Image (cartoon, rainbow, N blue to C red):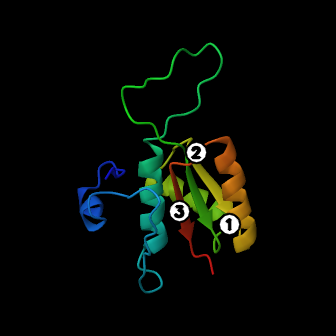
Amino acid sequence: ERRIQIPNDEELNNVLGGGIMPGSLTLLGGDPGVGKSTLLLQMAGQVASLSTPLRGVGMGMDDTSKPTYGPVLYISGEENSLQIASRAMRLGIDETELLLFCETDADFIAETVVAYGNDRALGNTDFDDID
């Protein structure tokens, strides 16, 4: 059982049973305004810090001594990208491998995730308020 350890968050790793289980689905619930979106964005940024950017031509060999993760796709059905980016800046999240996607159509989201996954494996996909 290989779990993704969320950097610098022992408490969240414990709540998740030792980290994020690849392929799993975790539902985060709570009253409006308690910080679910903020917690999810922080976690997405922390996991994105583990991501290994693609190497370009002439950039040397990949380091195979440690596990590699793809980028994190943060999907929001409630807020727009400017609102999310503003919150990320306030929280000090500045990860190039944290990708934002604002959409409410579940079919289009699924198609996009599958299409992106055909080009490059995602390290994690986070859904925030998708109805």
Which is in the foreground here, disc 3 or disc 1?
A: 3
Q: Which residue is mark 2?
A: 121
Crowding at dot 1, Cα within 10 Å, few <14 / some 14-19 / many 20+, comes out as some
119 or 8: nearer the viewer? 119
Residue at left offset 34%, top offset 52%: 3
Image location (x, y in percent) of residue 99: 61, 51
Other-residue count near label 3 (Cα within 10 Å), few / some / many at <14 / 14–19 / ≥20:
some
- Say whether residue 24 is left or right of residue 18: right
Front disc: 2 or 1: 2
Dot 3 lies on which element? strand
Q: Secondary structure at mark 2?
A: loop
Residue drawn at x 56%, y 48% is 122
Q: Is label 1 in a helix, a strand or a loop?
A: loop
Instruction: Answer with the quarter of the image where residue 110 lies.
Output: bottom right
Q: Can residue 14 be seen from the camera position used here?
A: yes
Quadrant in which the C terminus appears: bottom right
Question: What residue would you read off at disc 1?
Answer: 80
Earlier sequence position, callout 2 versus callout 3: 2
Q: Which mark is first along the chain, 1 or 2?
A: 1
